[in-house]
Image: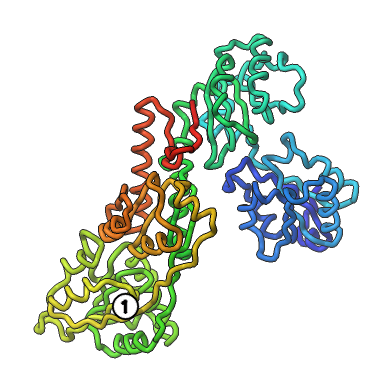
Amino acid sequence: MSPADHSTQARSGFVAFVGAGPGDENLLTLRGADLLSRADVAVLDRRAYGPLLRHCREDVEVVDIAADAAENSVSLKTIQAAKAGRTVVRLCSGDPSFFSSVTDEVAACAKADVDFEIVPGVPPATAVLTYAGIPPAASAPEFRIVDAAQVDDWARHADCAGTLVIYNGVADAVPISKALIGGGKPDSTPVAVTSDGTTTEQYTVVSTLGRLGPDLKHAGMTEPALIVVGDAVGMRDRLSWFETKSLFGWRVLVPRTKEQSKGLSEQLRSYGAVPEEVPTISVEPPRTPQQMDRAIKGLVTGRYEWVAFTSANAVKAVREKFEEYGLDARAFAGLKVAAVGDATSRALVEFGVKPDLMPTGEQSSEGLLAEWPPYDSMLDPINRVLLPRADIATETLVAGLTQLGWECDDVTAYRTVRAAPPPAPIREAIKGGGFDAVLFTSSSTVRNLVGIAGKPHNVTVIAVIGPQTAKTAEEFGLRVDVMADRPSASALAAALADYGAKMRHAAVSAGEVPRRPSQMRRGARRRVK
């Protein structure tokens, strides 16, 4: 039962049993996300559903059932919290109505006269099949779902005329297949077994009832898994879309600052990758701010003809100084503004400034110099350029502008500081080949990653944002496999996805099971068809 007035729920206490879905955190329902946002207490298996806590308030109390697995204890805590007037969300695997283990908890709430609501979730029976490229009920007269733990006689399921989905049966998959054959099911009947469905660890073995034993022998299948029996399995070759993503399952190291890595990580996830953000640098103000103070004053008083931005961090540093002095983008009136890179241009536009000059070719200092006009005393009333940059910036731009007749104020707008070393498991994965790829977005990320964690293993795909970063990587003995066609994080991720797609296509064309780079190192477990 569910009270109509949720403000009353918040005062009197309330328990919501929310289906967390099959594994993909993005398959949580809107109702489930809304309830989590208002939860005082979240009860869940943190190992499985920890990412869903992002929907909760920071002060939410978390009860981890993996740490306190006693069912009675969980029920007692849930009821006690609700009785104390708190809103409790109990996250359940899949859909609470499908072979759920929370039935007794729901009954305990009813017995204790605690208001509750049951929120359906996306069930694995349909979601995992869809993610595996198997239509749950396409042109099938029947769609039957069974729990292997509750079946004594498999022969009576051999007459299923459509698609048979089996929960909790992977450990007994071979005996089940033999029992279905014994019950009259042809041994040529297609069957698929999918483990870790809807996650980036998803893996599917396609076989027949008669060959399932040999085909599963080295697959290493464990729960959670689903067995699917029926002709719908044969459509997987045409409909598989999830496991065929270009970077499916790739563990990709993103060595950037936290602010910079969010958009890049989201893009990598869209390709099926598992991004892992490891900060290698942090951006801090300059040690002596007076230089920037003078630069901002000169910018406002007309000291400069041009301002050149070579990074989004430089834009951010100037913008923060403007805000400190109560200025806004109007202070750029009459100034010419140059920018290198899409991210820099985007940061300027967000500030309210449209760049007057960007390289049309290579997005670098060299590319900018190739198009920068020489100083002309007849056309340019002022011959000075402001360059707000990092403390470790190269001198290429200054030297080039000087040759063109300009005077440069090369100002330290921010410092890049090496981050602390990542945890030991991350360092071991970097050096041991546990990552499939690493994205280097600047020379400093190369130097700092090697400095704090060591060199990536030689099976790891090295992707760099441009020629200068490639040169630095090679100086550290790294083999560069991928380079972006333009210096932007988005282009770098797209280039890596294209590389992964080509690797996959080559394996499939050779009749092999596609393997990630990390699976090619010595001692890595090899999946078989």
Please tell me which residue lies in front, 277 or 264: 277
Residue at image mark 1: 388
* Relative height, residue 520 to residue 262 (above, below): above
* Relative height, residue 454 to residue 249 (above, below): below
- Residue 506 position, x and y percent, is 34, 32
Please tell me which residue lies in front, 358 or 493: 493
Q: Residues within 10 Å of mark 1 (few under 14, many from 20)?
A: many
- Residue 187 position, x and y percent, is 58, 12
Question: Which residue is at 46% across, 48% downward?
Answer: 432
Please tell me which residue lies in front, 274 or 131: 274
Q: How many labels were placed on the picture?
A: 1
Residue 345: name its quadrant: bottom left
In the image, 374: left or right of 77?
Answer: left
> Hey, what amino acid is under mark 1?
Pro
Q: Is any part of residue 325 visible from this angle?
A: yes
- Residue 309 position, x and y percent, is 30, 72
Q: Secondary structure at mark 1?
A: strand
Question: Which residue is at 43% across, 62% downward?
Answer: 256
In the image, 321: left or right of 357?
Answer: right
Residue 372: name its quadrant: bottom left
Q: Is any part of residue 31 visible from this angle?
A: no
Q: How is the image coloured?
A: rainbow
Question: Which residue is at 45% across, 52% downward?
Answer: 430
Residue 333: name its quadrant: bottom left
- Residue 246 position, x and y percent, is 41, 40
